[in-house]
Image (cartoon, rainbow, N blue to C red):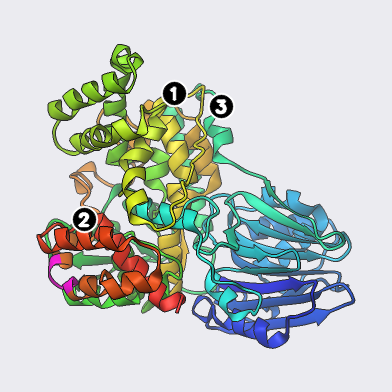
């Protein structure tokens, strides 16, 4: 795990000092070493920078930037390709010789041998910049799921690239102009969507894509090489339950074992839930030594799963470590969020994720997490809620045909006829439908139910409002669960969940690995019938059946409590001073983003005890603004 940064400058206005500064802005991603190579010719300047977190081949032989022996090819790379020994064996048959035991050299020669098709051989997470002077092109590649981040900015003269956008602040060509569309997404959903950055000039390479820059004519294009939609779009696999469980078990074992390949210590985050328990159980059974597991506990019982995790660790026989964190320890992380997340990010679970990363880093350099299980195997409560509500909508199609008025009346009835979590979706839809119209599909309904503001209120809040139109691809020949799973896998997973883990872990120089996001598992699960995943009220049904082969069912029974914080309580107590400061008239006028009258109204409602996501998101935006835009 590392950090990469650099540039290709056709204007010849860059220098090595800027390269060093850009690269060192990512020192937290790689504290074990640095490499900076600056060169130029009559056409362009090339800067390749790398910060190293030593995981494989701890010697200098694994140093980056790495060049081919003839000097015609170069590469910087962030991530891990877990099956590199298999790829290396193939390259040996092609006549390649290796001077290191690193996966970096394997990737370099695989790309030389096979070009972009070599990616099909890679199992892992990666962000790669590959320079090919033979074909006169530079290729920026991001892994299939988007575990590793990769950003770029291009002004037709200079291409900058980096693992995090903070590096761009160190180059003279970078302009800190805010992106209104990104602000809309952040406020409504807590994170930035698709390839957007908070900066107008910056984009993220989308998961499963690569960017190609032609060094001769300066043309640039982004090309997709993999998509989960390809596998969701296929008809359901014709497979019986027992065979599916066996195949998934085999895939999980291989994915977990591959992610233990390391020359440094490895541990596992164990929350006590089904996903992390499955990963820990498989690893402990197939590993020669006791694995290390890490759990944090909370004083608030509604958030605490430490006792459950401890029981599971005892049964598995892991070397278990637990930390009961005080409220003060969690609160101490809060003011650091704008530094850890260099673009606006409002997912409250970023705080405990950072804390457990800090705890694990005291013992290991690599930690396996179970992220992705809810998206791959349909574990979110929201799936059941949205499906139930949409089914009610579809069953009253006659009312929908009467237009907005009929749908509005129907939703009024629906909102008053359901209770609990389901009513939140219905009530929200009811309150806004007259402004937004009917939901054309279940994906639109799920997206709408997640919004903090909605179009009507964002128009009031933002001085410059631009509608962030979402083109949500729908899997036509699959059922509704497959449709919303595919959306979450492509949107929520890479833009929220994986951003959260990457920045939290990298802030303490810890490598995070996600076996449940092995693309082979995702491809297999996408093609399964939906009742293999959501079976009545049983979530992640097939994963639970695999888990039962390793651990008694009673050890993981019970509702999942989540990895969260008492946000509403904090907002009315510990964070009150920060809220009044960052929602003050002075702060609002200084940023020039929000309408002062609307923020004053939010502030007034907050002082009456209304602590909602709208206040939280503006608070964190202004904290970010103060750190990065001043």
Extreme residue toward the left, this view: 608
Q: Main secondary structure of the magenta part?
A: loop
Residue underneath mark 2: 612
In which quadrant is the C terminus drawn?
bottom left
Q: Could you say whether the residue bearing mark 1 is in a helix, strand or loop? A: loop
Q: Which residues are magenta?
A: 572-576
Task: Give the image location of residue 8, x and y in percent.
Answer: 75, 71
Extreme residue toward the bottom, this view: 17
Indicate which label's residue lies in the foreground, 3 or 1: 3
Q: Going from the N terminus, do you reach mark 3 or mark 2 first?
A: 3
In contact (CB < 8 Å): disc 2 and disc 1: no
Q: Going from the N terminus, do you reach mark 2 or mark 1 first?
A: 1
Residue at 87 percent of width and 72 percent of height: 43
Residue at 55 percent of width and 43 percent of height: 520
Task: Give the image location of residue 22, x and y in percent.
Answer: 60, 79
- The reply to whether residue 55 is in sight is yes
Task: Give the image location of residue 263, x and y in percent.
Answer: 54, 73
Extreme residue toward the top, this view: 398
């Amino acid at each position: 795990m590392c950090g990469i940064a650099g540039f290709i400058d056709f204007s010849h206005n860059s220098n090595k000092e800027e390269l060093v500064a850009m690269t060192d802005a990512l020192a937290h991603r790689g504290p074990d070493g640095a490499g900076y190579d600056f060169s130029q010719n009559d056409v362009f300047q090339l800067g390749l920078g790398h910060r190293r977190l030593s995981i494989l081949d701890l010697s200098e032989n694994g140093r980056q930037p790495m060049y081919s022996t003839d000097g015609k090819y170069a590469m910087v790379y962030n991530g891990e390709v877990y099956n590199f020994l298999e790829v290396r064996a193939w390259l040996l048959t092609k006549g390649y010789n290796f001077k290191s035991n690193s996966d970096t050299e394997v990737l370099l020669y695989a790309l030389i041998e096979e070009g972009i098709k070599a990616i099909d051989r890679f199992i892992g997470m990666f962000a790669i910049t590959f320079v090919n002077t033979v074909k006169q092109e530079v290729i920026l590649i991001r892994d299939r799921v988007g575990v590793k981040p990769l950003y770029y900015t291009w002004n037709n003269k200079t291409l900058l690239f980096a693992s995090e956008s903070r590096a761009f602040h160190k180059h003279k060509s970078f302009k800190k102009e805010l992106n209104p569309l990104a602000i809309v997404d952040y406020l409504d959903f807590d994170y930035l969507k698709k390839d957007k950055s908070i900066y107008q000039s910056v984009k993220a390479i989308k998961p499963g894509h690569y960017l190609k820059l032609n060094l001769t004519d300066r043309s640039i294009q982004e090309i997709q090489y993999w998509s989960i939609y390809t596998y969701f779009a296929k008809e359901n696999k014709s497979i019986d339950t027992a065979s599916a469980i066996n195949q998934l078990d085999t895939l999980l074992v291989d994915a977990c074992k591959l992610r233990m390949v390391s020359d440094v210590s490895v541990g596992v985050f164990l929350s006590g839930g089904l996903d992390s328990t499955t990963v820990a159980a498989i690893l402990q059974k197939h590993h020669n030594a006791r694995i290390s597991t890490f759990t944090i506990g909370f004083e608030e019982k509604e958030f605490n799963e430490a006792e459950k995790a401890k029981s599971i660790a005892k049964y598995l026989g892991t070397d278990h470590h637990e930390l009961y964190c005080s409220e003060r320890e969690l609160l101490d992380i809060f003011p650091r969020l704008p530094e850890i997340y260099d673009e606006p990010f409002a997912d409250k679970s970023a705080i405990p994720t950072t804390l457990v990363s800090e705890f694990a880093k005291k013992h290991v350099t690599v930690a396996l997490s179970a992220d992705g299980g809810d998206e791959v195997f349909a574990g979110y409560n929201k799936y059941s809620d949205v499906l139930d509500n949409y089914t009610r909508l579809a069953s009253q199609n006659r009312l929908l045909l009467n237009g907005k008025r009929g749908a509005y009346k129907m939703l009024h009835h629906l909102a008053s006829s359901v209770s609990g979590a389901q009513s939140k979706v219905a009530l929200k839809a009811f309150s806004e439908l007259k402004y937004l119209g009917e939901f054309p599909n279940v994906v639109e309904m799920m997206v709408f139910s997640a919004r903090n503001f909605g179009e009507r209120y964002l128009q009031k809040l933002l001085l410059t409002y631009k509608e962030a139109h979402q083109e949500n691809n729908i899997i036509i020949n699959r059922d509704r669960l497959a449709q919303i799973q595919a959306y979450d896998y492509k949107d929520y997973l890479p833009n929220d969940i994986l951003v959260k883990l990457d920045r939290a872990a990298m802030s303490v120089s810890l490598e995070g690995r996600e076996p449940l996001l092995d693309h082979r598992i995702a491809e297999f699960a996408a093609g399964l019938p939906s009742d293999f995943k959501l079976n009545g009220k049983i979530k992640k049904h097939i994963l639970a059946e695999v888990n039962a082969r390793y651990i008694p069912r009673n050890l993981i029974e019970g509702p999942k409590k989540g990895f969260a914080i008492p946000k509403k309580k904090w907002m009315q107590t510990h964070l009150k001073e920060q809220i009044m400061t960052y929602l003050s008239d002075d702060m609002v006028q200084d940023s020039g983003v929000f309408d002062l009258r609307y923020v004053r109204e939010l502030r007034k409602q907050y002082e009456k005890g209304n602590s909602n996501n709208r206040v939280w998101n503006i608070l964190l935006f202004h904290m970010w603004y103060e750190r990065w835009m001043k």
